[in-house]
């Protein structure tokens, strides 16, 4: 395939002898195009020759004018200084919100040779009109309130022209220019910089489109001199003669001229060149819609792999993967097959998208936290402490995990208690340390160097921040110096260069730069920094953005993110200039329509010579306008396909079904077979530690969850609570009653009204003590905690008042938080097992002299119906109905008490034996959500008028059945069929729910 640059190189080569080429200058839109052109030109001769000057347009302008361009950050400071001279009230942080946009506007103004005075005068008048409209109809009071603010707002536009002039003069005095300024300088002085110097005998402008007014002025001036300049265009009949196709907007003007604006055609003798590839060429076009953006990278990697497998060994054709969204660069790199060793990345990898940037950002977030405390005088005091969230985020960062691996020799997945990082994380979790000071962190880690560097307060001083970041680089450099990950090492080096640049700025600016300003500029430098990927131009795979494809051709092309608002970008305008000023013929500045047309040209030009084309777009989602496929695809489908019968358009489908998608798919069962080792483990557990009611309920709810918790030992990750959680709230309320009940047990086993009244009078002491025990590290009077504390206090008081008004006193309190454990002989597969049943009872008391009550406290709502079950339903529901967990819990509590009474030792409380024939046993729940209903007692009898012995025997029949199911090797652990149980399950991600 002959590419456009091959054709251009061949044309220029034929126009000159080998000796003449060194005096020729070729100008190309991009630096990547320069490399390809040089390569194409070199292949035309078997003899060595001095190459012509081949320059990208920016390099051409700088070379011709000899100016030195200022970097963007320094330019921002220069702009601020200029503004400060004109408006001393300008605030730096606010200035930064629009400064970059204003500089972009200055750049456009100069590139399009706009009369800046006329434009800014227009803008000032327009803004004045806006002010008049804003105040229309408002009361005088409202106007007065807004006057100061609006005057400052409009003063910006009144000062812009002065700022523009002063900035240009300031830069000229220093021998500096910004980009647009250099273009304007050359456009207005072509004679001075080019014609009078006679550096070259001829100039070629190759592959341009949508020239700025400055570029067009330069080219027109050179074309006027006979045989001194020539333009080579890359155009196609499809969009060149189709007035409705925006891709040809500018090329039509350059070819035909513009009589309305008095412009002649922009070429000499004849138009070079015009192809008919889009109208007649044979092309296979695949249009693929995928469910989300990340899948596009997988599709691109898979298609390229298939092309490689199908290609001949002699096939030297190049493939381009073009990213409409440059954020897909890393996913695409990771999606390439392992066999793809050599490829070129044109666009560079942004430091802003790197893991190192996330670490830097985490450090800045770490420094933002100031803990506020209120004194007894109700004054707010701010103490510099670090939030546990930011500490954990920093310590779990991949760069620090690598440091941990190398420094402390920790292997992946290994838990090492003596490791300072693991020790700190454990301290935060186990002791619920919400905020920690620098001193506390250093004490935990015994002044570990990493911690002395990271967890040192900057006190809002940029110099302290720079010092900290330098020290961090030194620590990480030692870790990565022997590492093979070249990209991460390059990140560190590039960031080191940025810090050096910031250090110079701080030295120049002294203490005038705040930490917020420092962060803003640091992030601006990071955003501008890209890791360059250097390689030969003839790699078989090129990964690039759409702008990097200018003048380049590929036989095989994969374009990703071919969606509206990406290709093209839509109506996004990064400018302070109003749209009516941009579009006014007097100024003729580029608008979003201009950007759309430019992107249309790049897109269709890229397809001209390609034979295999894949267009990948994201399918529509529920969000309005999201995922709409690009108009470029619609133009291919409904226009180009009718004009070119050699197009073969197909629509392959990608099957990608993720969690939460509505498509109904038969769920893959996750079954864990009960191996001999598992069965032996369960046997040991139930005969040694016992079966608790919660475990029995868990197995019946979801046997797979039972496996994860009891057998696999997978525990939920502990989290630091910044406020009272659902579980800690319940624990706190329980702890109050535990402490109250224990107090009665210590003083005597009887609860009288007078004793409860004394408790009520001293309830604040109980509440505070229980809160400290269950909510370590939290403050009861802080935010949401204060509200929840009041709720908990209300619950406790309400229950005590309920007892005072409704209980039958005296109450004999037998025991508190008592753990019962009984055993029975289960027959499993012909073998007898001594199985234990165990449980922890909140409260065991006796009323009316002979009624023993097994009581469980619940902070959640429990209703009487939850504790009812008809005897005829026992067979089906006692070990089957998953909604009867509370019923089963009380059943087992009653069973354990009666079983203990019937045992040889009997149930003995403080040396007193409680015989079953003299006592009635019942089990019940106090539900604090509906305490007015009183004690909700469970009434369970297997037969009418049964004895305690008969109840125990009947219960053990069902327990024996449960044990047999638990130890049945033919019944694997599997997911529950009731998916409502999965909604708040900690293991849903593991099992795929």
Image (tube, rainbow, N blue to C red):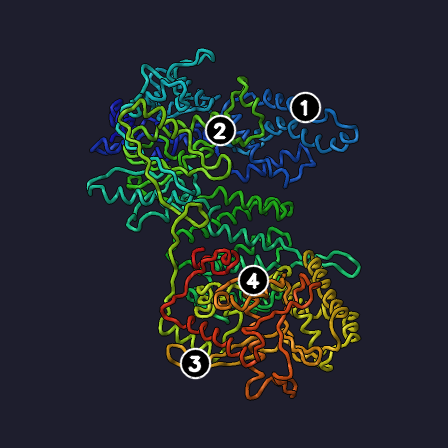
Between residue 572 and residue 957, name the one nearer to us: 957
Residue 833 shows which numbered tag?
Answer: 3
Q: Which residue is mark 4?
A: 719
- Left or right: residue 330 compared with residue 97: left
Q: Is residue 460 above or below residue 17?
A: below
Q: CA distance from mark 1 to mark 4?
A: 56 Å
Between residue 486 and residue 967, name the one nearer to us: 967
- Badge 2 or badge 4: first in the primary sequence: 2
Between residue 313 and residue 159, name the one nearer to us: 313
**Answer yes or no: do the residues labelled 4 and 3 have beta carbons within 8 Å?**
no
Residue sitting at x 66%, y 58%: 384
SS category of the residue bearing label 1: helix
Q: Which residue is mark 2?
A: 182
Residue 422 shows in the view = no
**Where's the C terminus, which quadrant?**
bottom left
Residue 961 shows in the view = yes
Q: CA distance from mark 2 to mark 4?
A: 57 Å
- Badge 1 or badge 2: first in the primary sequence: 1
Q: Position of residue 179 (x, y in %)?
A: 49, 31
Of marks 3 and 2, the one in the foreground? 3
Q: Which residue is mark 1?
A: 128
SS category of the residue bearing label 2: helix
């Amino acid at each position: 395939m002959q590419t456009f640059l091959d054709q251009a190189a061949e044309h220029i080569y034929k126009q000159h002898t080998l000796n003449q080429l060194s005096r020729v200058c070729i100008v190309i839109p991009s630096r990547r195009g320069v490399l390809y052109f040089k390569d194409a030109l070199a292949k035309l001769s078997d003899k060595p020759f001095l190459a012509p000057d081949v320059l990208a347009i920016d390099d051409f302008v700088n070379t011709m004018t000899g100016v030195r361009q200022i970097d963007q950050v320094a330019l921002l400071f220069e702009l601020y200084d200029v503004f400060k001279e004109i408006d001393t009230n300008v605030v730096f942080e606010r200035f930064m919100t629009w400064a970059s946009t204003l500089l972009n506007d200055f750049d456009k103004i100069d590139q399009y040779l706009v009369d800046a005075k006329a434009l800014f005068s227009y803008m000032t008048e327009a803004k004045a009109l806006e002010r008049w409209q804003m105040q229309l109809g408002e009361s005088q009071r409202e106007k007065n309130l807004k006057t100061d603010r609006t005057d400052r707002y409009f003063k910006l536009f009144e000062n812009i022209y002065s700022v523009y002039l002063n900035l240009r003069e300031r830069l000229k005095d220093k021998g500096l220019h910004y980009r647009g300024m250099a273009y304007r300088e050359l456009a207005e002085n072509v004679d001075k910089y080019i014609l009078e110097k006679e550096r070259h005998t001829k100039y070629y402008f190759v592959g341009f489109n949508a020239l700025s007014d400055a570029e067009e002025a330069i080219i027109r001036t050179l074309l006027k001199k006979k045989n001194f300049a020539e333009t080579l265009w890359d155009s196609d009949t499809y969009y060149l003669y189709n007035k409705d196709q925006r891709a040809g907007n500018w090329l039509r003007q350059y070819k035909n001229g513009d009589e309305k604006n008095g412009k002649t055609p922009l070429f000499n003798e004849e138009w070079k060149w015009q192809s008919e590839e889009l109208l007649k060429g044979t092309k296979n076009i695949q249009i693929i819609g995928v469910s989300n953006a990340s899948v596009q990278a997988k599709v691109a990697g898979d298609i390229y792999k298939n092309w490689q497998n199908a290609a001949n060994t002699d096939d030297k054709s190049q493939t381009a993967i073009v990213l409409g969204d440059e954020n897909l660069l890393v996913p695409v790199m990771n999606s390439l097959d392992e066999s793809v060793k050599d490829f070129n990345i044109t666009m560079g990898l942004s430091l802003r998208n790197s893991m190192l940037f996330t670490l830097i950002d985490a450090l800045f977030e770490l420094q933002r936290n100031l803990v506020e405390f209120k004194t007894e005088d109700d004054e707010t005091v701010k103490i510099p402490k670090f939030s546990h969230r930011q500490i954990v985020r920093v310590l779990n960062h991949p760069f620090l995990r690598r440091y941990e691996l190398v420094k402390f020799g920790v292997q992946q997945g290994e838990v090492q208690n003596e490791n300072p990082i693991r020790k700190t994380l454990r301290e935060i979790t186990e002791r619920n340390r919400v905020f920690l000071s620098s001193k506390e962190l250093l004490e935990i880690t015994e002044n570990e160097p990493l911690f002395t560097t990271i967890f040192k307060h900057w006190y809002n001083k940029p110099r302290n921040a720079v010092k900290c970041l330098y020290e961090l680089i030194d620590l990480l450099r030692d870790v990565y110096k022997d590492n093979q990950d070249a990209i991460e090492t390059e990140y560190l080096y590039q960031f080191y260069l940025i810090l050096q640049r910031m250090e110079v700025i701080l030295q120049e600016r002294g203490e005038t730069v705040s930490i917020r300003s420092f962060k803003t500029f640091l992030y601006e430098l990071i955003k501008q920094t890209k890791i360059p990927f250097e390689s030969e131009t003839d790699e078989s795979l090129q990964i690039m953005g759409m702008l990097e494809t200018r003048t380049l051709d590929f036989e095989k092309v994969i374009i990703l993110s071919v969606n509206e608002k990406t290709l093209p970008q839509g109506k996004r305008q990064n400018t302070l200039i109003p749209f009516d000023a941009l579009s006014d013929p007097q100024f003729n500045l580029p608008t979003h329509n201009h950007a759309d047309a430019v992107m249309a040209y790049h897109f269709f030009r890229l397809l001209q010579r390609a034979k295999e084309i894949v267009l990948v777009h994201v399918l529509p989602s529920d969000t309005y306008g999201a995922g709409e496929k690009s108009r470029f695809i619609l133009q291919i489908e409904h226009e180009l396909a009718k004009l070119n019968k050699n197009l073969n358009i197909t629509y392959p489908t990608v099957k990608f079904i993720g969690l939460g998608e509505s498509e109904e798919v038969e769920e893959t069962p996750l079954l864990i077979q009960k191996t001999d080792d598992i069965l032996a483990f369960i046997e040991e557990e139930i005969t040694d530690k016992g079966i608790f009611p919660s475990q029995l309920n868990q197995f019946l709810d979801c046997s797979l969850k039972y496996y994860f918790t009891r057998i696999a030992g997978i525990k939920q990750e502990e989290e630091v609570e910044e406020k009272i959680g659902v579980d800690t709230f319940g624990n706190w309320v329980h702890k109050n009653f535990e402490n109250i009940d224990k107090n009665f047990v210590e003083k005597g086993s009887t609860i009288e009204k007078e004793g409860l009244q004394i408790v009520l009078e001293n309830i604040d002491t109980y509440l505070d003590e229980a809160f400290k025990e269950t909510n370590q590290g939290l403050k009861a009077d802080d935010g949401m905690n204060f509200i929840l504390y009041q709720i908990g206090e209300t619950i406790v008081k309400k229950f005590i008042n309920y007892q005072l008004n409704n209980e039958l006193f005296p109450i004999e309190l037998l025991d508190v938080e008592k753990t019962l454990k009984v055993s029975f002989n289960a027959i499993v597969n012909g073998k007898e097992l001594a199985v234990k049943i165990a449980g922890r009872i909140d409260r065991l008391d006796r009323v009316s002299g002979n009624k023993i009550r097994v009581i469980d406290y619940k902070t959640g709502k429990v209703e009487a119906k939850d504790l009812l079950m008809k005897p005829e339903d026992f067979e089906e529901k006692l070990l089957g109905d998953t909604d009867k967990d509370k019923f089963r819990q009380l059943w087992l509590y009653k069973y354990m008490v009666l079983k203990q009474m019937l045992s040889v030792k009997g149930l003995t409380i403080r040396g007193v034996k409680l015989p079953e024939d003299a006592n009635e046993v019942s089990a019940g729940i106090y539900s604090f959500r509906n305490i007015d209903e009183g004690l909700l007692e469970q009434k369970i009898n297997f037969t009418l008028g049964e004895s305690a012995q008969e109840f125990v025997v009947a219960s053990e029949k069902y327990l024996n059945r449960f044990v047999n199911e638990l130890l049945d090797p033919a019944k694997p652990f599997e997911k529950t069929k009731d998916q409502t149980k999965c909604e708040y399950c900690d293991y849903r991600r593991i099992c795929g729910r």
